[in-house]
Every structure is written in C-alpha cells, then in structure tokens.
Amino acid sequence: MSFQDLFPVDSLSVLQWQAMFPLLVLGAASVLGLLVSPIPRAGRAFAFASVSGGALLSLIGLSFMSFQDPVSVLDGVLYFDRSSQVFSFVILAVTLGCCLLSVGFDKREHLVAELYPLMGFSAVGMIGLVSSRHLMMLFISLELMSLAVYVLVSMQRRSAEAAEAGLKYFLLGGAASSVFLFGVTLLYGTTGTLELSALAQSAQGLWQGQVPLLFALGLCLIAVGFLFKVGAFPFHSWVPDVYTGASTPVTGFMISGVKLAAVGLMLRLGAEIFALPGLLESHGALSQVLSVVTALTLIVGSLLGLVQNNVKRMLAYSTIAHTGYLLLGFMALTVGGQAAAADAIASYSVIYAVMNLGCFAVLTLVNPEGHDDLMLKDLAGLGRSRPVLAFALSVFLLSMAGIPPTAGFFGKYYLFLSAVSSGHIALTVLAALASVVSAAFYIKPLVVMYMDQPQDGVSAPSPRWFGAGLVVAITLVLTVVLGMLPAWVSHLL
Amino acid sequence: MNSLLTYIALLPLATAVLILLLPSALTSISKALALFASALVGVLSLYLWLHFDPQHALAFAVKAPWLPALGINFELAADGLNLPLVLLTGLLTPLAILGFWNHFPEDLKAQKHWAALLLLMESGALGTFLSQDLVLFYASWELILVPAYLLIGIYGGEQRRAATLQFFFYTFAGSLFMLVGIASLFYLQTAAGAEPSSSFVALQKLKIAFDGEGLASLASAQGLLFLAFGAAFFVKAPLLPLHAWLPATYRQAPGIVTLYLAAILSKMGTYGILKVLIPLCPQAVQAYSPVLMGLAALGIVYGALLAIVQTDLKSLIAYSSLSHVSYVLLGLFSLTEGGMGGALIQMLNHGIIIAGLFFVASILEQRRGSLLLKDFGGWSQATPVLAVCFFILTLGAVALPGTNGFVGEFMILVASFKASVGATVLAGLGVILGAVYMLQLYQKTMFGPLKEGDKPSDASFLEASFLTLLVAAVIGIGVAPQSFLERSQEAVHAVRSRFAEPTSAAWNTHSDQAVVSKGV
C-alpha cells in the first residue's frame, strides 16, 4: 500500500498557493494584529498597521493574478475564478477602507484595538465565502465572517444599544446559520455530495420531471440562510436595529462588506443550483415565493425608509430596498440569460459597496461624539460648514437613488435590463416605483444639509480624520467616474 | 468641425466643474466664466444653425463607444428637430445670465453655485436635444434634475421645500418609467434577434406590436412603451393632468431658474414626444391621438382660466405657460406635418416669449419687492423701455399676426382642425381667454395710477439689452418664419412618415399666409 492511498491528497501546486495568497496573508495579518493589540497605548496603531498592511498586500497580490483558468484546491473546497477574484478584490478594498475610516473614530469612541483584527478575520471569511464551491466550506466561511461581525457590532461596550444590537444579531444570525446548515444536510442527504457542480450533476440525475421534496426543502432552507444575510423580507427585522446600534465604521463594514459577500454567496448558489433546468418549473411555488419576497423586500425597504429620522436607520432600510433590486437580478439569474444577470448583480453589488462605503465614511466624520445617534437634523447646515463632505454625501445618496451621471444609475439600469429580459416586467415596474419612493428619503438629507439652518445656529464640530477623508475622496471619484465610464465596471468583471 | 456638437454639449459641463473647483480667491469670476462659456456655446450653436443643411439627415454627427457591450454610444447629431431648440438654449442661456447679471445673489459663494448649476442645466438640456442615443438622452435628461432641485431648494421662495419635493417626485417618477421603457426596448431588440443598440436609428427599425381595442391596447407592447415614455414626457411638458408640480415650482423658483424651467426644460418634454415617443410608438400615439388632443385642448383652457384668477404675477405667467405649452402638445398630437411643424416652431417661440415674461416679472419683483398684482400699476410712465418691450412680448403671447406666436399657433390650429374639430374649437376658446389674461396683466401693471410710494426705475442697460433681443426675436420670427421652418421640414416629414397615411398639405406656410390674407 502506497502512502498515496493512505493520505490521498495531492501536494498543493505553486499555482494553488498563489491563489490562496490573499487568504493566507490576510489571515496571518489578522492573527498578528490580534497578538499586538494588547500592547499598551500603541496597540491600536500596531493592529491597524498589521491588518491594513495585510489587506493592502493581498490586494496588490490579487491584482497581479489572472484567473483565466479557474484554480481549484481540494476538489472545489476553494475555487478561484474571475468572479471570486473581483469579489475578493472589492472585499479587500472595503476592509482596507473600513480600517482607514476607523482611525481616529476608534480612539474617540473607546473602541478596543481588536476592532482591526476582527475586521480582518471577517474579511477572510468573506473571501472564503466567495471563493468556494463546497457547501461545508461555505458554511464555515459564513460562520467565520458572522462571528467576527457579532463582536464588532457590540464593540461599543458602554452603549446599551450596541449590546442589544449585538445580541439580537447573534441570536437571529445563529438561528439563520443553523437553518442554512440544516438545508446543507438535506442536500447532502439527497445527493451524497457537498461540492456544488457534483451536486448539480447528481441532482439532475435524481429527478425525471419531478424534483424530490427533500431536495427542494433543502434549497428553501439554504435560501433562508442567505436571504437572512442579505436582509430580505421577511428576514429583515434585524437590519435596522443592528445597523443603528453598531458604531458607524462597523455599519459601513457590514453594509458594504458583509452584504457583498452574502451577495457573492447568493450569486454562486443561484447560478449553480437554483438555475438548474427544470427546478423552478417543477416547483412553481418556489419561484412565486421568490417573486413575493422580492416584491415585499422592495416595498418594506422603500416605504419604511420614508418615516425614519435616524440617518443610519434610514440607510438600513435603504439597503433592504437595494436587496430587493439584487433579488430582482437573482430572479433573472434563475430564469436564464445567466451570464448577463450574473454580470448585472456583480456590477451592481460592486457599485453598491463603493457608494455605501463612501456614505458611511462621511457619516463617520459627522457622527456626534458618544452614543448619540446621528439624526437628520444633525446634518443641518453641513452644506455651509463642510461643503466638500456635504457634496460627497449628496453624490453618494443620488447614486443610491440611481440618478445619472453617478455609478448607481448604470448599476440599476443593468439590473432592470436583466429583469426585463427575463420577463419580470411587473416586478421591474414595482422596482421603479420603489426607486421613486426611496428617492424621497435619499433626498431628505440633501434638503436638510443645504436648506436648513442648524438648530443653535452652529453646526456640530466634525473632526478631520485623514483616513476617513481619503476614503471619501476615493469613493467619490469612483462613484462619478464609474457613472461616466460604465464600461470600466464591465472590463473589471 | 466634427467635434462641434461635443463642444456644444460638454463645454458647459466642463465649465461647471471648473467653476466648482475654483479656489475661493477666484470665486468672484465665476459669473463671468459662466457667461463666457455659455456665450461661446451660443456662438457655436449659431454657427451650427447657419451651416445646417436640411437635406442632410444627421448633421455634424459625433459617435464614440460608451458602453459597447449594450450598444450604447455617445452619439450626437443635429437634425431639423433639435436645431431650433439647440439655438434657443445656446442663445438664451448667455443672454439670460447677462440679463440677470445684477439679480444674482450678492454672496460670492452663492454666485458660484448659481453659475455652476445653471451651466449644468444647460449641458443637460443641450445633451438631451442633441443626443441620438436613447441612454445618452436619458442621462442628459436626468442631469437637469439635481441642479434644478438645488437651485429651487436653496435659493427659492418661502414655500420652496414643498415645491422642490413636488418637482422632484413628479419628474423622477416619470424618468424612472422611461428607464423601464428603455430596458424593455433592449429586451424587444434581443427578442427580435437584433444586436442591442440604443441608437434612435436602430430603435426605429424595431417593429413593436400594437393590438387590442380601446384600453386593452395599452397592455400591448407598444401601449406599455407609450405609457412608460409618456410618463416622463407628459410630466415634463406638462400635459394635463400631470401638471400639478408646475405652479408651485415656477412660483417658488428664483427668477432665472423659472425662466430656464419654462423656456427650455419644458421643451425637453415636448421634444421627447416628437423625437422619441411618436417615432417609437406611432400606432399607439395615433390610436390615442383624440384623447391626447382633448387633454391638450383642456390644458389650454384650464391654464388660461386659472391664469385669469391669479393674484400674483409669477403664478399668472406660470399658468399662461401651461396654456401655451398645451398648444404645442395639441399640434404634436394632431400628427399632421403642419401640426408638428407648428409645434416645433412654437416651442422656440414659447421659449422666447415666456423667457421675456418671466424676466419682466423678475424685474418687477426686484423693484417693488412684491409679486402681487395689486401692488402694481402705472409703470408705463416711469419705465418706458420696459413697458414697450413688455408690450411686444404680450402681443407675442396673445399671438398677434406679425409676432412669432402667431406663426406657431396658427399652424397648429389649422392642422389640428383637420384632426379634431372639437379640440380645436376648445383651443380657439383658449386663444380668446389668453388675450384676456395677458392684456389684464399688462393693464394692471403698466396702466392706471402709480401706487403710493412706488418709484420704479426703468430697465438697466443689461436688462434692456436682453429684453430688446427677445423682442427682436419675437418680431423677427414673426416676419420671417421660413428660415426656421425650412430647416425643420425634412425632419418633421420623416417623423410623419412613420404613419401609413399620406401627408397633409398644411405644412407650407406660404399657403397659410395666403389663407391669412384672405381671412384678413
């Protein structure tokens, strides 16, 4: 008996090591960050340097790689291709951005130095989530990402609201994860494999015109898992509380990073399994449920956003509405015209990450000190006191509303296009209506910033942190340039 | 001069960005910079107008790939349809800046915002008119929204907030439906096996199904597209009953913005109908033409009636604008060559006249500090220049022969009479009502005794120059409309050829003038 039979795993090739470079570097940097963070006084600086350095290094490494031929490690446990590269790239950039915009804020709000390594760990989970085709690895990555974020959310230790948000997110998220895991076991039970392409193959062999109930049930449970993570109706109730309770840079991290990774997961599962021919046809109810979920997500997000006075809470509802647009793309993905729909979702989520990161960078700068929430009225007079910040925030909000020449316009246009092409006309019209409604609350901060006077005559002082300013500048340029030259996004993908 | 149109469309945009980036030491030149850039655009558009050859369908065309995967190009060209509007926008903008030179806010920072936002609006309008690509058209169309919103919202009157919100939602809702319409067109193209392209030329080759009787036809592909595009254009124009945003917005906006909204932005709606809606949904427009003409005629009378009962100047002119734009719509929906040609020249005419009227209103407001009609009276003695110019503008507005208003309204009414007698009779009633409110306005402000303590000063040199040029245009186009009509004839004919029926002969104004001389 040869050793090869005893330990039937090939050594990793150079190419595979290369592909894993970002994961390994960021993972190591996060561990290092964790080790240096207890150092008195300098801990924050060291942790920041370690994690952001790791993220930057991975980012540079990643941009030199080419995944024309996908690289698979351990039969798809890790699987690197163009799409995973793009998602990982944006995740790393978002992580770097969030590290940058926490500098200064962390000290003022007494956040512990572990903030940075936790972001790093979460990002490792996210990268795993977008570069795996193996259900178990997907689950582990999901948990790695989420566990770090649970802690991040409740990091503002003296705030009861943050603790509540953390607990709420932890309990609900844990429940959603277990539902996801249960779905995975059902799929494994019916097909005998956890690797997605093998699973798809064996599933297609399973049914002749009739999909087994257990398989469909498993899919539903998995869908619950990712619908929870992206904050779709009816699993959206945690979103406003958690996004409001978490400290502003962390909310930015969740809204642009965690969301992006969850969309990556949704995209992969959608393209590999939900789009299997004959699946949704034989379970007509499944696609009806998806349409209803999409419609209600759009409605809930845009209508409830209207009545918010808390800026972060308003943006939380806005992300629910954005989830609705993404689900619209997901519906298109499952019907056919796959490549186009996948591109639409990917470009939209990239654009979405950019504009939200920028938005939260501005909010970090104008956030009042202490545990007070940022209310709409706090923005009054910002147009005069900090014209550049006000202008940037306006651009980000207009981009979220989808007004040209900002990037958000083309993102939304791509999604509408893919939805209409797959025949979901009624849903697209609903999405257009929801856009009008949500434009109502995107325009609110503009009104307040430019047209209102601050209550006591002077605007609240806002710090001039370099990191956050840099993030604002970069995302602002990206939002405008991608809006004017949309072909760049497609080149990137 | 192949890049002529690129300069025309993008020069204001580039200057706006430049102005926004001006260091604070140089803010004082922002107004001058805006004037300089827009004057340059004005000269270029005049050059374009003079060198335009009506036989050449798409002149001075520019085409560069923008988003090749979806067949979207940066494609500009001049044709008979957009030529008068480009000229209007190109010339009116610098003149308005000049006329309003001393009406700009004192604060230098505010001046900078005004200058930049006005240029952004100009760029959006020119882009909308010149674009030969639907997505570029949409992007330019939306470029207007935010600057207009900010200008009204920051510098508008007391109730500006409600006005801006109404303005924003009406227009944005309309635009989003247009966006869905554009997406559907791509879908129809791929479904028909064609390469996706958003070029107008390619889109017009598309056969879009139209079937069903009455309301059921709205559910066919063409019916739905009609609704989607109509939503955007009818709001912007506006067509009754989508006009609710107009009175408050015009009333609350600062003078130069109201002028811009009424003179240029409302033309984007009517131009959209001519350039996009009718060519893309010919059968739908034809089927609904009676209803649309009815709504337009109602708009004429409704606007006129409400104008009569207004107590302040700006609201009165706002409603008069609603009434006059409805003539344009009436002409467009008559779907005859004469009607559409008349509508086209009436867009230009209305732009000139309404700009003059709102400018007069601004002068009156600035001098008196009030807009209420009851605060005015007897100005003709003290302000002779203003009074004369205002008078000629008033004559243009009531469409007296010899003024430009007459040419357009006459062509429209003759053409629409052939299409719908009822609507034309109603519109004719509007002509009479129009005379009532315009003459009333003139009489109440200019005649009678001066109000106590009112010492109005006449138009300044800059104001008078602007008014004189407008008055010259009112008379010039009224006397020699052919130079405008001949440039548009071919293009309107091409739009008309989207319908199966033979064209009517009411186009040529020489024959119209023959009718006039008989009538007189």
Image: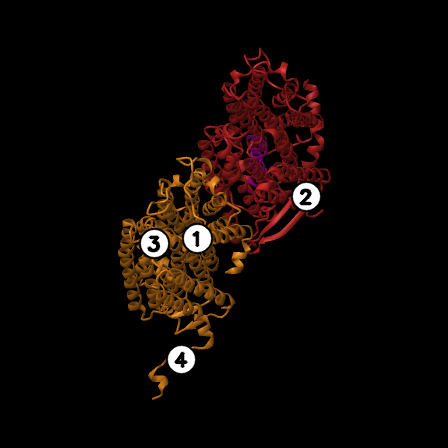
Chain colours: A orange, B red
Please, what is the three-letter code of the amino acid marked with disc 3?
His
Up the image or down, B379 lies above or below A357; here it is above
Q: Which residue is mark 3?
A: A110
Q: CA distance from mark 3 to mark 1?
A: 22 Å
Asked if residue A492 is among those painted magenta in the image, a careful observer would answer: no
Q: Which residue is mark 2?
A: B57
Asked if residue B278 is among those painted magenta in the image, a careful observer would answer: yes
- Number of numbered discs on residues: 4
Q: CA distance from mark 3 to mark 4?
A: 48 Å
Asked which secondary structure carries label 1, the reply is: helix
Q: Which residue is mark 1?
A: A357
Q: CA distance from mark 4 to mark 1?
A: 41 Å
Q: CA distance from mark 2 to mark 4?
A: 68 Å
Please, what is the three-letter code of the amino acid marked with disc 4?
Asp
Mark nearest the camera among 3 and 1 is: 3
Q: Which residue is mark 4?
A: A10
Q: Position of residue B179 (x, y in %)?
A: 50, 45
Q: Which residue is pictured at 50% across the width and 54% down the height? A: A474
Of mark 3 and mark 4, the one earlier in the sequence is 4
Q: Which residues are magenta?
A: B258-281
Foreground pick, B156 / B139: B156
